[in-house]
Amino acid sequence: MITEVMLWSSIAIIVMAGCYNSTLFALSRRRVKHARGPRAERLYIFLLACLNEEKVLAESLARITALPAGNFLALVIDDASDDRTADIARAADPQRVRLLQRQLPNARKGKGAALNAGIRHLRQSGVLDDYHPRDVIVCVVDADGRLDPHVVQAVDPYFDDPRTGATQIGVRMYNRNKGLLARLQDMEFVIYGDIFQSARRYIGSVGMGGNGQFMRLSALDTLCGYDGSGPWSDSLTEDLDLGVRLIARGWTNQHCTTAAVSQQAVLDVRRLVRQRSRWFQGHLQSAGLVPLILREVPTRAAVDLLYHLSSPVLILLTSLMPLSFLVATGGTVIGSVEAGRLLFSPMWVIGPYVLSFTAAYAYGWVYFRRERNLGLARAVLLSHVFVLYGYIWFAAGWWGLWRMLTGKQTWLKTART
Amino acid sequence: MYGKPALGTVMPLAGLTAAPEVLPGIPFARGLQEAAGAGFLLYCAIAAALLSAKFWFVLRSFGDR
C-alpha cells in the first residue's frame, strides 16, 4: 500500500507541474493593460560587469552607443580582467562610455559586488546629481548582450507607472543558427519569457534575469542596507534575489515582450551544464528568501515565488524518473528477448509520451510565433527535442547540489567563444 | 528558473505499478520512482507548513489593521 502511494506520488509531481505550466500558458495569452502616470525624461545607465570580456565587449558597446535614445550612458565595470577589456572600454565613445576599473584583492567577488561598486561610482562621480532617483533607470547588461535598437522606447512606458520598480526584457541567442544546442537555448529563453514571465505579470511575481534587466534607481535605493551595502547580494543568482526583494519592498516587476537582449549561446554541452549548475546552486541559496516572502510578499505572488524557489527540489526529485524509465525499459526489452514475446503494453509508450510531450505542442507554437521562418511543424518537432534538452537540468542540479554541499562558492564564469 | 518547463515533461513509468517484478531491473526502477514519490510527500508536507505560516502572517496583518 505504501509502495503504491509513493509510486503515484511521483506521478503527482508531473501532474502538478503540468497543471502549473498549463495555467501559466493560459495566463500568458491574455493582454496586459498598463497603468500610466506622468511622462518624464529619464536617464538610462547601462551597467556592464566584465571579467575578461575582450571577445564580445566591443560589439556590445557599439550597439549601446548606437541606440537612438537621447539621455543615456554606459558604465563598464572591469572586475580586474587579465585581457584587453579595459582598453576596449577606453576606445569606445567617451561621451557615452565610462570605465570603472576594480583592482584585486577587492575585485572578482562576484557580479553583485561589481554592480554595487558601479552604483557607488556613479553617485561619487556626480553623474546622477541633476536627476531624481525615480527618473534614473539602471540597466544590467551582460558583456555579450546585444540590445534591440528600440529597447529604451519599448521599456520607458513601463516606468510611467510610479509603482514599477523593474522591467525585464526578453532574452534571445544571437548565434541561434549555430547548431542545435544554440537553437534549444534560444527556445528555452523564448518559452521562459513568453509563457512563464508573461504570465507572472498577472500573479505579481515577475523575476529578474540578470541580462536586460531595467531598474528604477529609487527602487534599488530601497534595497540598500543600513551598513552602506549596495542593492545586489553576493548570491550566485543575484538577479533572482534582487527581483524577489523588490517585490517584497512593494514594487511591481514588469516583463516587456516587445524588446530583447541577445546573448551568446553556449555551444558545448559540458560548459552548458556547468553554467546551469551555477544557476542551480544560486537558486538553492535563494531559499534564504523564504522568510521574507512569507512576511512581506502578497499571498498570490508569494505562493508562486515559493513554487519558483522550490523548483530545484522538484527537479532533483523528478530526475529519478527518466532514470527509472530507462532502467525499466531496458529490463523489459531484455525480458522480452528472453521470453521470445513482447512483455509490455502499448500504454508504457503512450502514457509517458502523453505525460512528457503534450507540452511540446504548446512550446512549439509559442516559439513559432517568434521564429516564423522555421515553420510550425519544424518548431513542434524541435520542441520535442527541447523536452529532452530539459534533462540537462537534472545533471546540472546534482552538480550544483554537490557544489553547495562541499562549500564551493566560486564564480564559475562561462567562457566566451 | 529556466528549468521550469522541464518539470512538467519528464518521462515516468506510469504503468510501473503493474509491472511484473520478474523482469530484470524493475525492482530498481520501482525503487527510484518510490524515492521520488517519498521526496514529493515530504515536499508537500513542508509546502503545507509554509503556506500555513503565510496565512498566519496574512491573518495577523489583517488583525493589526
Image (cartoon, coloured by chain):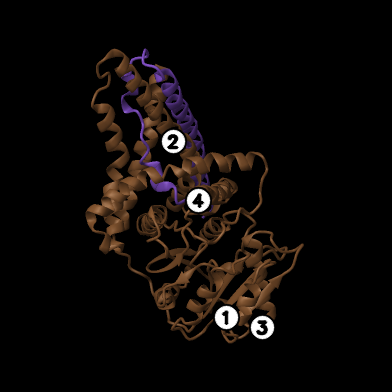
Chain colours: A brown, B purple
Mark 3 and mark 2 in contact? Answer it, CB < 8 Å.
no
Q: Amino acid at mark 1?
A: His
> Which mark identifies residue A132?
1
- In percent of the image, x 39 and y 23: which residue is there? A5
SS under mark 4: helix
Front residue of A128/A96: it is A96
Q: Which of the labelled discs sits on residue A246, or is there none? A: none
* Residue A318 numbered mark, or none: 2
Q: Earlier in the sequence, mark 1 or mark 3?
A: 3
* Helix, strand or loop status at disc 3: loop
Residue A316 to residue A97: above or below:
above
Residue for badge 4 = A272
Disc nearer the start of the sequence (1/2): 1
Looking at the rendered structure, the kind of residue marked 3 is Gly
The answer to whether A329 is drawn above or below residue A101 in the figure is above
Chain to which the residue tagged by mark 1 belongs: A
Alpha carbon of mark 1 to alpha carbon of mark 4: how far?
Answer: 41 Å
